[in-house]
Image (cartoon, grey):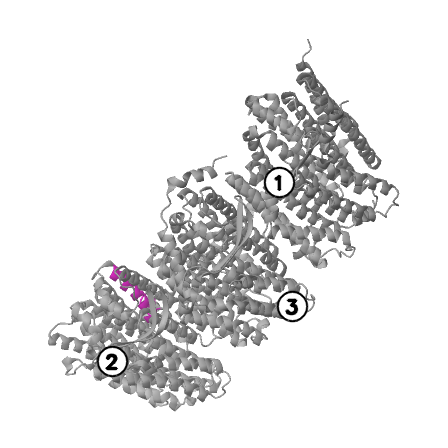
Amino acid sequence: MADYLLSLIIFFPLLGMLFVLFIPRDNDGLLKGFTLVVSLVTFVISLPLAFDNIFATSGGMHYREFYEWINIGDYFQMNYNLGVDGISLWLVMLTTFIMPVTVLSTWKSVQKNTKGFMALLLLLETAMLGAFVALDLFLFYIFWELMLIPMYFLIGIWGGKNRIYAAVKFFIFTAVGSLLMLVAIIFLYYFAVESGVQISGFGVHDFYKLDLPYNAQYWLFLAFAFSFAIKVPMFPVHTWLPDAHTEAPTAGSVILAAVMLKMGTYGYVRFAMPLFPDALQTFIPYLAGLSVIGIVYGSLVAMMQEDVKKLVAYSSVAHLGFVMLGVFAMNQQGMAGGIIQMVNHGISTGALFLIVGFIYERRHTRLISEFGGLAHKMPIFATIFLIVTFSSVGLPGTNGFVGEFLALVGAFESNLRWFAVVATSGVIFAAVYMLWMYQRVMLGKVTNPANENLKDLSLREIAVMVPLLLFVFWIGVYPNTFLDKMNPAIEQLLNQMNNKQVAVVEVYQPVVAKLIEIK
Amino acid sequence: MYSNLWLIPFFPLLGSIINGLVGKRIKSEKVIGGFATLLVFFSFLVACQNFFRLLGDNVKTHEIVIFSWMSVGKLQVDWGFLLDPLSAVMILVVTGVGTLIHLYSIGYMHGEEGYYRFFSYMNLFAFAMLMLVLGSNALVMFIGWEGVGLCSYLLIGYYIEKQSAGDAAKKAFVVNRIGDFGFLCGLFVLYWTLGSKGVWTFNFVEIAENAHLLETGGLVVTVVTLCFFLGACGKSAQIPLFTWLPDAMEGPTPVSALIHAATMVTAGVYMIGRMNILFAMAPSTMLTIAIVGAATAFFAATIGLAQNDIKRVLAYSTVSQLGYMFLAMGVGAFSAGIFHLMTHAFFKACLFLGSGSVIHGLHHAYHHAHLHDDPQDMRNMGGLRKKMPITFITFLVSTIAISGIPLFSGFFSKDEILWWSFGSTRGHWLLWLLGALAAAMTAFYMFRLVFMTFFGEQKTDARAKDHIPESPLTITIPLMVLGLLAVIGGYIGVPAILGGANHFHHFLDPVFGKSLHLFHIEAHGTHATEYTLMAVSVAVAVIGIFVAWVMYIKNPELPAKFVTKFAGAHKIVFNKWYIDELYDFLFVNPCKKIGTFFWRGFDVKVVDGIVNGVAWVTRGIGSGLKYTQSGYLHNYAVAMVVGVVMIVGFYVFG
Amino acid sequence: MISVHHYLLLSAILFCIGIFGVLTRKNAIVIFMCIEVMLNSVNLTFIALSRHVGNMDGQIFVFFVMTVAAAEAAVGLALIIAFFKNKESVDVDDFNMLKW
Amino acid sequence: MDANLVQEAIQNVNLQAIMPSLVLCVFGMALLLVSVFTPRGKTSHVAWLSVVALVITGFVTLTAWNNPQAGFAGSVVLDNFATFFSMICIIAAALTILMSDEYLKREGYPVGEYYPLILFTTAGAMWMASGTDLMTIFLGLEVLSVSLYVLAGFFRRQTRSNEAGLKYFFLGAFSTGFLLYGVALLYGVTGTTKVAGIAEFVKTMPDLTSNLMFLAGAGLLITGFLFKVAAAPFHMWTPDVYQGAPTPITAFMSAGPKAAAFAAFMRVTIVSFDSIQTELVTVFWVLAVLTMTVGNFIALTQKDVKRMLAYSSISHAGYALIGMVAWNEVGWSGIMFYLLVYTFMNIGAFAVLVLVGKKGEDNLTLDGLAGMGYKRPLMGVALCIFLFSLMGMPPTAGFAAKFYVFAGAIKAGYIWLAIIGVMNSAVSLYYYLRVMVCMYFKDPQEDFSWVTMNAATTISIVIALAGVLLLGVLPGPFMEMAMLAVF
């Protein structure tokens, strides 16, 4: 069982999707129910990972699966190479966890083409899970790009008014970055081949062992970093995000925020940083600078938004700035903070998008000015919204604090101290924009007659939110459940990055020269 | 031994959760309020038990770890509680005053919408405050620190329909967050500096033990303490972050009493006390604190002179009194500061509750007469002492206490502070002077309040004035208890010069003694000086009272004349020195402008401009190129020939 | 003495005339003739070179070229006729429905 | 005459080497006769018989895998290379024929000659792939071209089709002139028209690389091939002809003949011109960039889907040319794999268009496709997959193919070319996405009620779909085959 567990987790949703295709298209309930069951089962299948104590003791890859996939002698080799460690573990869990929640949230909001919606959701889940556990760069790239397809349709078909622009922008923006990364991946492979290092396919662990000369690292890192930066998204390549988020249907926004953005940060942790440690040293100040700018910039822009969803989208930019800052701190605390903040952001921002979805379903508008005084009409909603707001603001005791705190501690310990000081000011801005929004939406008198008859959350909607709230407090109060299992992996990653000798430039320079002859 | 410590914060948390979840279903207000009060009272009992146990214990510092919170490499943070004399005093104050105010709220909040919500929040507040004072490391303290901020937000904004309440709540939280920013920065710098010397810790005990690793008076310790002080400023409403506290009076009065007078706002003082060793190591920070404290005491008092809203007067008075406490901390009178914190908790809570009682009565009367006058405006009051005798007496007692009249609690604590500010090795006579002036003003405006409210003729609308009742027992019992405490609370800390043993000081010695001793902080001077100063401070208080009596009882038209004569000064003071407007101008509006610019200017125009521009240019090139495809055979043939010529030419001549 | 170069030069000139004709003439038939000129110049080249290098491959090639040219003529004329039926024109400037 | 000589001559002939095309031609001629006796409109059986012919040919061709046959004194070789390309052409032809029958009936030309013509074209293409003498290559090219001229102008009452046929004919003949002139010059220098002979000759005479006649000949010859593969600036016939020709023929042209042209092009350049590879590669570099860019940029502005796909096919030729620039086994086998994949995905896309087109096909514009994804969900999904494959999105075959070609370029050190290539793919995303925007994100304007599914077209779509997915998920064996097919 354990031998195939990862494959099972990845492909179970795909299997489910195939079945969905055979359900009659007008049987709305069955479609949604079946999809819910599939996503729940996927979650259950993935639970053994979360309970496996091996992650707490060993930082390496577990649940390895390795099959030869494409093998054309010296020219090419790619493998079906999967594995999960303490870092990807929680992202996998986040994905499998957030999916049932998402499906449940579509009950009322998705009415047209349910079949397509559900099929795409499940396809998306497979792609996301695959990207998190792939250890072969080629395989990773396949899942990475595959993610774009369902999301493109989710935004484009079920999105808002400006959905076409948003969908196309999302697709092309992210694809441009990944295409450059593709060139870098191929280059890396042939570098390995030419330099005679023993490799099996595009296995990332083999590439870790490469001693790349600095000049090669420099460009390769740029290509990887650019691609991931778009996905994160980091300032200034973030502008696809507000559009995509705003136009996407609730479920799409939730998945986009909760999981897909994590791909970028995960990509840094797993690929861009450990593969090119020397170049990383050069770029850390710039990237950390961009992260910090992202925090302040995202917050300031979020503050002025008139659309709730756009506000949350910009707040994502700020939150992911914390993640990146923590990761770039390159120490245990920062890294752990970054990773747990990824999970946190998934939960909090996911919840925020669900919340926006709830009111959008009721009022079909997201303009802040349309609301006001909802707390009267929807007390349960108000409470949940409040908790999520404060989780997003990073109140101690909720998850947001743990992540931000660890990331900032890490940054302070590293030589990103001054960046960290500026980043810390983000806690002020977060309070400003979130509370201001909460006030304008929820507090005050009901001024708009359209809001008079709003119904409070239904049982189903509460059921959607409760699991998220549970984790808000769980991670806030006892993050050790998660930290314990991620620590060994982080330690191993850092050791590997720090112990790696500075590349012997002379030895491998000819290989680079051979590969980059100016022609 | 002290393993039941966790029960102290746990009870209110339990109450908060239960009331929050099922309170809505419970129809009986008594059950809700009674339950909440009872849980805080349980906490109080546990606190008492632990306090007395500590009294009899030789070891004065106890740390109880519940479980590990975060553990990442060398960063280890526990859910841990610390019981030492300082936190023992604090838990007593918090649970004791807290219980009374909960009890008071049962009656005061009668009939309000969301009754259960109120008590849930109040209990949550008690929980957070107890976490703050009990936390054994800076992070658990920070939970409480932010938690009280959260509850403050919730309770200030309790009247969700009121726009001003929402604004005030948000302002409170955001300003607090500015302070928290400082707190966090200080914490990080401290953690990193100590860590680089081999001690990675957030634990207070360990910090205190290893503080010697830092250079006394050095840059690091100064920066750290200044950062912490910024945090304290935010929480305790000191210059420049005091503006939220007066606005916070939008909340229900018990909230003002509990949070914005007795407990939360004193968290900053407590925090300085908790880390006294670090502060003692940074004389320049201490000086800053003293100056800020004195200035706040003075400055807030000036504003208090001219306010007409009963709660606002009290609010500025609180700011001013907090200034005193900071002055005390700044000159090294740590135990005096905590002492004043405690006495202030008694009399200020009593004052707020008293004002609440008045408001409650007036509100009742107005409601009865279907009027919409402002029940908080003192110009609508007057002569209430007959209508509300209990309220009046307790209020008067507390006012006397705050004015620093001998034999009342405020006298002992305030006097000790003034003495230290003059005579301490870290004091200065100018600090004393500011403090004394503030004391005079305090006496003046507090008595102005008493005179306007309880004396003179009744200025309440005729239709309402006969319907002002005395408040019910749930309200008056806390008033009486607090009034009593306001009188006698000072006797545990009677200074030696007045023949007392200053038990309070000795009790706290395990916490503060070390730093006082190590850094030679002491107040020295002759008895004569001390007596003189005492006399002076009493004298100015009496003068203040006298002036108030002249202006508001003897000669009620005097204030108006005064106002016209010094119109400019009055306007400035009345409008709180235009600080809010200044902040709007300096920070709020620029932030909004920058935000808008970033969004509409940078994001939309520049970044998206480039993105869309690239797309536009690409399409443009395409549209241009497509006309090469003219449809004419000749053009195609020409293109081919050109291609052939180029290629062959390249081969042949290239 | 007429050397192989003369033949080559002549055929090159013929080839260029053919190209020039294709580029300038408007009548489809004339253009087709110009293409035939090009092909025939190639044939001339082949024959001259065949003689020059001394094997028969070039001459065989010419047979194939001639055959192919005949086939092309059949197909080409058929296409021109079909077009003429529809448009009543053999002017190449008239077939520009498809463009851009 | 000496009996031994005759014996030797007969052995030299070795019909095995041309067996596939022989089978095809025999079938073609037989079907031509059959179609004479077939009443107008009853041509289905001719179509099916052609498919049978192609299947048989396919099996015959496959017997030559790893069993190379040379014939006609070495002017024809049926090696792995030829087999691979022949298979591409056979697949292309079969898929085309499957989608044609209903189409011809709808458009009002249900005549039987159509199918033999496709078979002849295929036979010509196979000759091109297996020709090792410029003479056989030329013959194959002309057999292919002459049939295609007819097919492009097949709708003889339709001006558009006439125009396509004529333009193709004139420009094709024109380019043939250049090609022949090049052959003649090469013959003059080397004294042979055999590909291997030229290579041999060049090897012995290293200073040939500065021989004007040789270089000019090589240049002209290559030009002729570049016309057929539609590389810029010889691409200009493509959009017009593709747009005007009957849709199945367009599909066929973009896959089969293009593959054949690449086959001959590769064989000639790689074998004969190895010594001047530096110059060649430089030109290919420029042409590849130019071709990709022109194709993609103009495609951005197209409203007619057929014409858009024509421009897209130009850009794909550009991607394939990257493999030539790489000048290594990965690049070459990359081209072969690319063309195989392209056959499936492009013909698949056209097959869907055939199905949803109205008579006259005026509705094959972006607006005409609005909402098609909802009205014909299965067809919509299929078209989407083909388009994603054309974009190069994993896990479709298009991605594997692009990956392969770019890998060749990077292996050879052409990082910049690879970057330009991927950036071009990024540009291409836009117009492919736009089709999907119309299909799914816009509300239907047409009612699509005339679309009747028919078995044959559906089969071709399904086969193409299977190919695209199979080659995308398990490209290994096919890449390996391509690798083995490189000589």
Marks 3 and 1 on same chain: no
Residue B228 falls inside the magenta stretch? yes
Tag 1's secondary structure?
Answer: helix
Q: Nearer the viewer, mark 2 or mark 3?
A: 3
Q: Nearer the viewer, mark 3 or mark 1?
A: 1
Viewer-closest of C41 and B47: C41
Q: Residue D475 at x, y = what percent?
A: 60, 49
Q: Mark 3 and mark 1: span between their CA atoms? A: 48 Å
Residues shaded magenta: B220-242
User: Given the image, what chain letter belongs to the residue carrying mark 3?
Assistant: A
The answer to which image quadrant residue B401 occupies is: bottom left
Tag 3's secondary structure?
Answer: helix
Q: Amino acid at mark 3?
A: Leu
Q: Residue B142 at x, y = what percent?
A: 35, 70
- Which residue is under mark 3? A31
D36 relative to A115, above or below: above
Q: Amino acid at mark 1?
A: Ala
Q: Mark 2 and mark 3: span between their CA atoms? A: 72 Å
Q: Mark 1 and mark 2: span between their CA atoms? A: 100 Å
Q: Nearer the viewer, mark 1 or mark 2?
A: 1
Residue shown at 68% from the left, 66% from the top: A23
User: Given the image, what chain letter belongs to the residue carrying mark 1?
Assistant: D
Q: Residue A245 at x, y = what percent?
A: 54, 60
B58 relative to A68, above or below: below
